[in-house]
Amino acid sequence: MKTKIKDAMYPVVFAIAFLILWELIVRLFDIPLYLLPSPTGILSVMDSSLWSHMLVTLLEALAGFVLANVLGLITAVIFVHSKPIEKGVFPLAIALKTTPLVALAPLLVVWMGTGYSSKVVASMLICFFPILVNSVKGLKAIEHEAWELFSTYKGTKSEIFWKLRLPASLPYVFSALKISTSLAIVGAIVGEFVGANKGLGYVVLVSSYHMDTPVMFSAIVASALCGLVLFWAISLLEKRIIFWQRTDDL
């Protein structure tokens, strides 16, 4: 318990030290507000309206995150059990990944409007590829001896999947989930840049037009908080589910 508290204190101490240094630099060098606001200046504009925008972005990101990971896992299972489909569809997934989201976002708004749907899909698209790649790799990462044991006992495909492939893939899957937590927020915000009247992306866009740098920074801080909350939630879930895997430093 003491070790966990000690580990949790490291980022808190470093964050506080960074904020104090930031505040001192802004005050000592008298940096203009429009260039770099101080942490106290940013905190002063973080009102209830910002938290409502933050909630909108968080819900969009969560919906896209869940959809991407469900579809990615299903697609990975299909790939593992069908080589022709994997060889035919995987290049399309790579092409989708290499297409910049900022180029797709306007199309999503045209097709789905400026509501939640276009932002959810934008978030889903950016999260889809990591979970697909890691899940395919994880589902194939089974030990040869274990495979031979299941083959010897004439294990069915269903038994091999649930008792061998899936447990072996979980570390890879959770690695992808943790990567996707930040990507989901990015996808939702990019979608809001193109067409929205609420959300953190909307706040950043409007504040940039008015050169309201403190508000812009407050939205950036809020988006970072969303990413941290999602990351910590997935990390906690990973420790609960993959209880046999030791992640502590040796």
Image: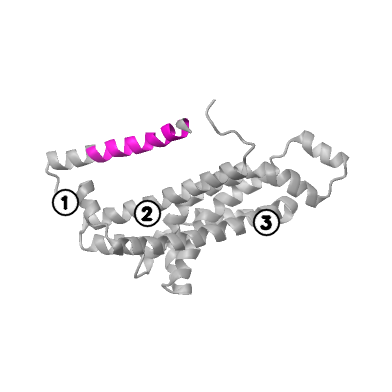
The residues tagged by marks 3 and 2 sit, at their Cα atoms, a distance apart of 37 Å
Name the disc covering residue 81, or none. none
According to the image, label 1 marks what residue? 33
Residue 143 relative to residue 153: left or right: left
Q: Is residue 224 above or below residue 117?
A: above
Q: Magenta segment range?
A: 3-20
Depth check, front residue: 110 or 113: 113
Quadrant of the rendered structure where residue 24 is? top left
Residue 221 location, x and y as percent?
Answer: 32, 51
- Where does label 2 land, which residue? 223
Residue 118 placed where, x, y %?
A: 46, 68
- First-in-chain label (3 vs 1): 1
Give the x, y percent position of residue 49. 30, 64
Amino acid carrying label 2: it is: Ser
Q: Is residue 119 magenta?
A: no
Q: Quadrant where the C terminus lies? A: top right
* Residue 50 visible to an observer of this rendering: yes
Q: Amino acid at mark 3?
A: Gly
Going from N to C along the chain, the mark reached first, 3 or 2, is 3
The residue drawn where x is 17% and y is 53% is 34
Q: Which residue is mark 3?
A: 88
Using a 10 Å C-alpha cutoff, classify the residue at mark 3 as few (fewer than 14 neighbours), some (14 to 19) or many (20 or more): few
Separation (CA) of disc 3 from disc 1: 54 Å
Q: Find the residue positioned furthest to the top.
A: 250
- Residue 190 visible in the current orientation: no
Kindly identify the residue that appears in the image at 31 percent across and 56 percent down: 219
Q: SS of the residue at dot 3?
A: helix
